Image: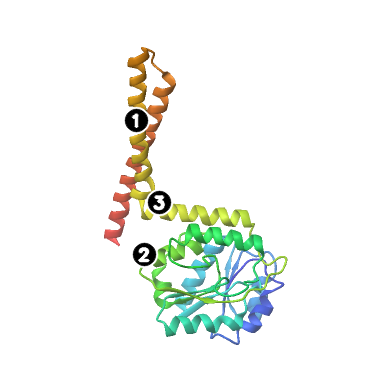
Amino acid sequence: MPAFNEEHYVASVLVRLMKQVDRVIVCDDGSVDLTGDIAEAMGAVVIRHKRNMGYGAALRSLFKAALDHGADVAVTIDSDGQHDPTQLTRLVEMLRENDLDIVIGSRFLEGESGVPGWRKRGIDLITRVSANGSGVTDSQSGFRAYSRRALESLNLTEDGMGASTEILMKAEEAGLRVGEVPISVRYHEDSSTHNPVAHGLDVVLSAVKHMSIRHPLLFFGVPGFVLLVFSVYMWVFTFSRYTSTNVFSTGLAVTSLTFTLTGLSLLTTSLIIWVISSIIRERD
């Protein structure tokens, strides 16, 4: 359980959760309230961050702790009470029975999700941007089950909410099998401590970063090539106009030069990132 200032809800979540699992590990991510103390008093293993480092940093600590405790299956669940701990068995059974590595509790697989309209539209948009054609319906769900293989394979670098997207992208790279099961959620007025705009921006920027690293020739090379082709057209138009009117257009020349330099920069960037990424993959 990643937790940040959840003293009002962490106890009720733990009471129901401890009936379902062998061990509960809570990452108190720099809380300034009694979140960590309450979790510790109730018998949870508590990891404490001295300052708030973010959702992704909390997941890194939790994944490491789960491996250290010899977990075969680890389940992440939000500490604000929006998830129903009794539904945890759905995720674990799906994982084991179908030999999967990651199972996501999706709010949108069946029926009424219970998600407010504005939040659902935002999640839908983020999922389309970040799911990378994987078929996942809820890329931002924090209710997930992981096999030991997944815990050992996933090396997270994102500190913030972009970690949810990073996990899906790196799972695809590592050949991990991902599935979903339907879950229900219950929201209350302070069920999320994250600004929805900041959350969305964090996730989108994370997706853009990882896509640009994974596919640099596509992400940078194709736009660069298009700009170079367009710059050739602009140069031809500029000199054609000069020969017909005997007037050299400085504006057209500057525009053509801008397209040329930008296109060359993007192509060069794509080649550099592609070479570096290839070297790193070979070494890995």
Observer-nearest of 283 and 244:
244
Residue 41 picture quarter: bottom right
**Kind of element beneath mark 1:** helix
* Picture residue at 35% right of the left edge, 43% below the top: 269
Is residue 269 left or right of 89 when viewed as pictured?
left
Tell me the element at label 2. helix
210 lies left or right of 124: left
Residues at marks 2 and 3, CA–CA distance in whole angstroms:
14 Å
Indicate the quadrant containing the C terminus: top left, top right, bottom left or bottom right: bottom left
At mark 3, the secondary structure is helix
Q: Amino acid at mark 2?
A: Glu
Q: Nearer the viewer, mark 2 or mark 1?
A: 1
Mark 3 = which residue? 212
Mark found first going from the N terminus, 2 or 3: 2
- Residue carrying label 1: 233
Amino acid under disc 3 = Ser
Q: Quadrant of residue 252?
A: top left
Q: Nearer the viewer, mark 1 or mark 3?
A: 1
Name the residue carrying label 2: 173
**Residue at left offset 45%, top offset 67%:** 135
Most foreground residue, 41 or 57: 57
Earlier along the polypeptide chain: callout 2 or callout 1?
A: 2
